[in-house]
Amino acid sequence: MSISKIKEQWFGNVRGDVLAGIVVALALIPEAIAFSIIAGVDPMVGLYASFCIAVVIAFVGGRPGMISGATGAMALLMITLVADHGIEYLLATTILTGILQILFGVFKLARFMKFIPRSVMVGFVNSLAILIFTSQFQHFVDETWIMYALVGLTLAIIYLFPLVTRAVPSTLVAIVVVSAIAISMNFGVRNVGDMGALTQSLPFFALPNIPLNLETLMIIMPYALALTIVGQLESLLTASIVDDMTDTDSDKNKESRGQGISNIVAGCFGGMAGCAMIGQSVINVKSGGNGRLSSLVSGIVLMFLIIVLGGVVVQIPMAALAGVMIMVSIGTFDWSSVRNLHRVPKTDASVMVVTVLTVVITHNLAYGVLAGVVLSMIFFAVKISKVRVLPLYVHEGRKKIYYIQGQLFFASVTDFLDSIDFKDDIDEVTIDLTESHLWDDSAIGALDNLETKFEQNGVTVHFKGLNGESSRLLNRLGGVSKSAGH
Amino acid sequence: MFKNILLATDGSEHSNRAIDQTLKMISPYKDQGHIELVYAVDGEKSKKDVLKYGDSHTATAKRKEKFLDTIQHIEGQGVKANISILHGEPSETLIEYANNGNYDCVVIGSRGRNKLQTLVLGSVSHKLVKYVKSPVVIIK
């Protein structure tokens, strides 16, 4: 990359990037803490992750203007790992996820993202929103009406404050106001400090303290794979959104590698795996950030605020964070997908719903994506396996022509053969394949089968109209030897 | 005479009415007129469209496609037209775009899609009237 381009990406928009970076840092803190709590780890794990990832990705990312950090999607995948094996295994998984993501970028697998249908993406986003929402229920257990009132107040401020001014992020105002009320009135509601320790120090380098053996790998590999897929999915989706908002292109493979590098760094410095954040990136671009500087500033300001204000941060009531998370889930959910559910094709709608249900039942976003992709493939195979066969008698009923329309492959040959009448009393049959295409061994086999069956009844078979690729396949596989091409 | 016209649209009914009124306005000298439609995509719309269409390129193509009928409609009346798509907060980007170009006037419908926003924040059209340097025509 040329010097002038590097300079442009870093210093092309200093004022906008610095201001947007500060706004993003303020919005990152409550989310990083809340996502740590979802994952079941100390708030510092999420804060260190957001700090490391935001700083590292500023240098190695492929999409300037995008914000990455600890995210809900990733946190949701870690819950059982942390519960069963503890934080050290999470850090090891984070590093492994980073390595896998670098491989993803090196082998340029970003292009395979196109195999993930859009209805699966929408299902992914919706189920993410639902899981973030339901993960907040635990904070309401054994709480009094005060908790509900504070959450309500948080949400009211978040949604109504923008009507007064948009200069200050309304989530920040909500957190400050609700914290002030909770602290001054001494309600005794749970706060961030009750959920884990908050150390006011910079992260330090330490490799995870785990036995390096095959057993460990077997434990962390499935989690790392799920984190890799979900992380790349959300990061590349976010990159496309930032592409669109800024009307510029980005290097998706570089971004994949960058996500990997930043996760390795996060894992080495006590942070959990993260990825790009849709909401924060939108906030960043809207606040005027579009360069690499904004991500760097957001990470540094975040760490600075934690070190300086850590004592205050632990007193933030969980009610305020729960309110922010409910807002995040409402904002993440793709409401238009529900409004238009009756309008989109039934297959697309069911893929979306199955993706969501799989995630909600298994609590694993990766399973949902997998289920959605498999179901879409089945639907596609069913749709494309429809073959139309139009018979036509000629020569006073002594000859019959079958016009075949559609794709001939393993899923469609049964229907194709079923619609041919072998008992016809005729002399000659022509199979017109002009509007068809032979795809595989099964298709060739079906034509062979057809020819044999007709010849048993003394009927001559002709094939015509094979397109180039189909006849090459036919020659290669050596089927329909006698009459092909005539 | 308003020849080179910038017309801010969001694809809504109000915008379509603005187009028809503009055509009426310039009908005596329509062969000299040119209408540039301009559509601003904000952050939420970007998010929704990318989710819907997969990536930015497809989303851009689909947006242009959406305005093809409108352009045909205008050209069918004998007036040249094209569409420009901008990205960012609608009023800010529209004002900047309008002031950087050389337009005889800027036309906008009086009310876009979001009624609540108009009620509370003031409308895009009000901001345009205030900050655009060339004459602004608001179609009610």
Image: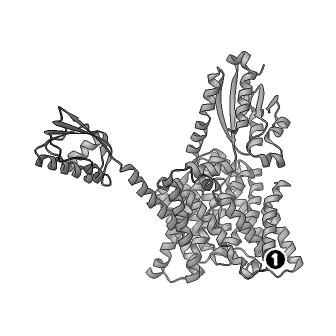
Left or right: A271, with A310 as reference point: left
| Disc 1 target residue | A146
Q: Residue at x 65, y 48 (%)?
A: B46
* Three-letter code, disc 1: Ile
- Measured as percent of width and height from the top left, residue A33 is found at 71, 72
User: In this view of the protein, which residue sits in the foreground, B109 or A404?
Assistant: A404
- Measured as percent of width and height from the top left, residue A246 is found at 66, 46
- Measured as percent of width and height from the top left, residue A449 is found at 19, 51
**Tag 1, which chain?**
A
Instruction: Say if A410 sits above or below B20 in the image.
Output: below
User: In this view of the protein, which residue sits in the foreground, A461 or A24?
Assistant: A461
Q: Residue furthest right?
A: A184
Q: Quadrant of residue B76?
A: top right
Q: Residue at x 18, y 41 (%)?
A: A484
The chosen color scheme is one colour
Mark 1: secondary structure: helix
Residue A108 seen by the camera = no
Q: Residue at x 70, y 37 (%)?
A: B13
User: How many neighbours does mark 1 have within 10 angstroms: few (below 14), some (14-19), or many (20 or more)?
Assistant: some
- Measured as percent of width and height from the top left, residue A80 is found at 56, 78
Q: How many marks?
A: 1
Instruction: Say if A329 sits above or below A419 in the image.
Output: below
Residue A325 seen by the camera = yes
Instruction: Say if A320 sits above or below B64 in the image.
Output: below
User: In this view of the protein, which residue sits in the foreground, B131 or A138?
Assistant: A138
The image quadrant where one finds the C terminus of chain A is top left
Q: Quadrant of residue A176?
A: bottom right
User: In this view of the protein, which residue sits in the foreground, A40 or A2?
Assistant: A40
